[in-house]
Image (cartoon, rainbow, N blue to C red):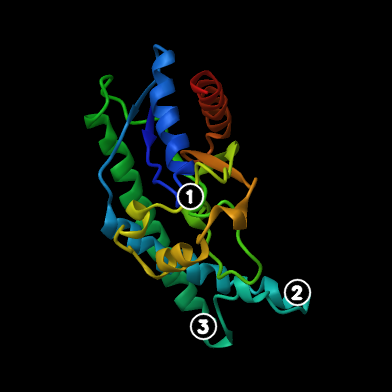
């Protein structure tokens, strides 16, 4: 089994530490290995527009008769699309899915078996939990929703007041985006998130729910051995 380790460090290191633990502990299983791919910034940026706009065009909000909470409000009546515009947006999603599949298949160049990776290990989001009124961010789950990929989330650890302090290294890290800036400003101290669960996500291809569950079970066992 080959797993792409795509986890990035969280503010205090909980999520990043868990991902590193998974990578180290995976050596306990002779048939498993972890490979890492370089960041694909361009392809990652391209998925944001269709994923956000598709969220606001389905009309489900009208059925409830209630407004979205501020943290989940990402659209407005002005952003509603015509049928043709909706088609174009779905075409953009399809185009992105093709590019993503190509990237996935190219991972065969990094594995010793010559086969593409089975799945991806990633954080769930940049924060252990969202405070009230926090601006909506689907974090690392967005790609699974957009491309209808199979995914499983499993709890790994909890925020620790000693281990998850904000470090100088974290403060000096380059800010990648507006959402990154918001996450940085939100995680000012571990006390805000004390004892919150920190999780990891396993993503597999479409219609591979059983494989995603199996990979999550392997990851859970590896993490327990590491601890």
Q: Residue at x 77, y 79 (%)?
A: 65
Disc 1 crowd, CA 10 A, few/some/many (<14, 14-19, 20+)? some
Q: Earlier in the sequence, mark 1 or mark 2?
A: 2
Rounded to the nearest angstrom, the CA distance separating label 1 from label 3 is 40 Å
**Where residue 144 sits in the image (x, y, percent)?**
50, 49
> Relative to 66, does residue 39 appear above or below in the rendering?
above
Specify the quadrant that holds the N terminus. top left
Q: Which residue is mark 2?
A: 63
Looking at the image, is mark 1 or mark 2 nearer the viewer?
A: 1
59 is higher (above) or lower (below) than 131:
below
Question: Contact, CB < 8 Å: mark 3 with mark 2?
Answer: no
Mark 1 or 3, which is nearer the eye?
1
Q: Does the rendering let one see residue 120?
A: no
Kindly give the residue lying farthest to the bottom in the view shown.
78
Residue visible at 68% across and 71% down in the picture: 60
Please indicate whether residue 154 sits to the left or right of residue 48 in the image: right
Q: Quadrant of residue 35?
A: top left
Badge 2 density bin: few <14, some 14–19, many ≥20, Cα 10 Å = few
Residue drawn at point x = 52 percent, y = 48 percent? 124
Q: Residue 74: image x %, image y %? A: 55, 75
Q: Give the labeled residue for mark 3.
A: 79
Task: Residue 197: give x, y in percent of width and height.
Answer: 62, 44
Labels in figure, total: 3
In which image quadrant can residue 115 be found? Answer: top left
Neighbourhood count class around disc 3 (C-alpha, 10 Å): few under 14, some 14–19, many 20 upward: few
In the image, residue 131 sits, relative to residue 5, either above or below, namely below
Separation of residues labelled 1 and 2 (CA atoms): 44 Å
Residue situated furthest front in the rendering: 162
Q: Secondary structure at mark 1?
A: loop
Note whether residue 210 is visible.
Answer: yes
Q: Nearer the viewer, residue 71 or 183?
A: 183
Residue that numbered label 1 is attached to: 165
């Amino acid at each position: 089994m080959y797993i792409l380790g795509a986890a990035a460090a969280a503010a205090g290191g909980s999520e990043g530490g868990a991902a590193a633990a998974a990578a180290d502990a995976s050596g306990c299983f002779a048939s498993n290995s972890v490979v890492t791919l370089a960041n694909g910034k361009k392809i990652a940026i391209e998925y944001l527009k269709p994923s956000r706009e598709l969220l606001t065009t389905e009309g489900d909000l009208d059925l409830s008769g209630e407004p979205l909470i501020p943290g989940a409000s990402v659209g407005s009546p002005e952003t509603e699309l015509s049928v043709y515009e909706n088609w174009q947006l779905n075409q953009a999603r399809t185009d992105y899915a093709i590019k993503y599949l190509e990237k996935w298949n190219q991972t065969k160049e990094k594995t010793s078996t010559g086969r593409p990776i089975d799945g991806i290990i990633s954080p769930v989001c940049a924060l252990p939990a969202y405070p009230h009124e926090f601006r909506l961010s689907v974090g690392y789950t967005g790609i699974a929703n957009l491309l209808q990929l199979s995914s499983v989330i499993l709890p790994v650890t909890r925020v620790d007041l000693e281990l998850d302090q904000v470090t100088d290294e974290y403060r000096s890290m380059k800010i990648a985006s507006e959402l990154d800036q918001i996450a940085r400003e939100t995680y000012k101290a571990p006390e805000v998130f004390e004892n919150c669960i920190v999780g990891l996500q396993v993503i597999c291809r479409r219609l591979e729910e059983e494989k995603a569950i199996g990979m999550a079970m392997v990851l859970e066992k590896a993490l327990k051995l590491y601890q």
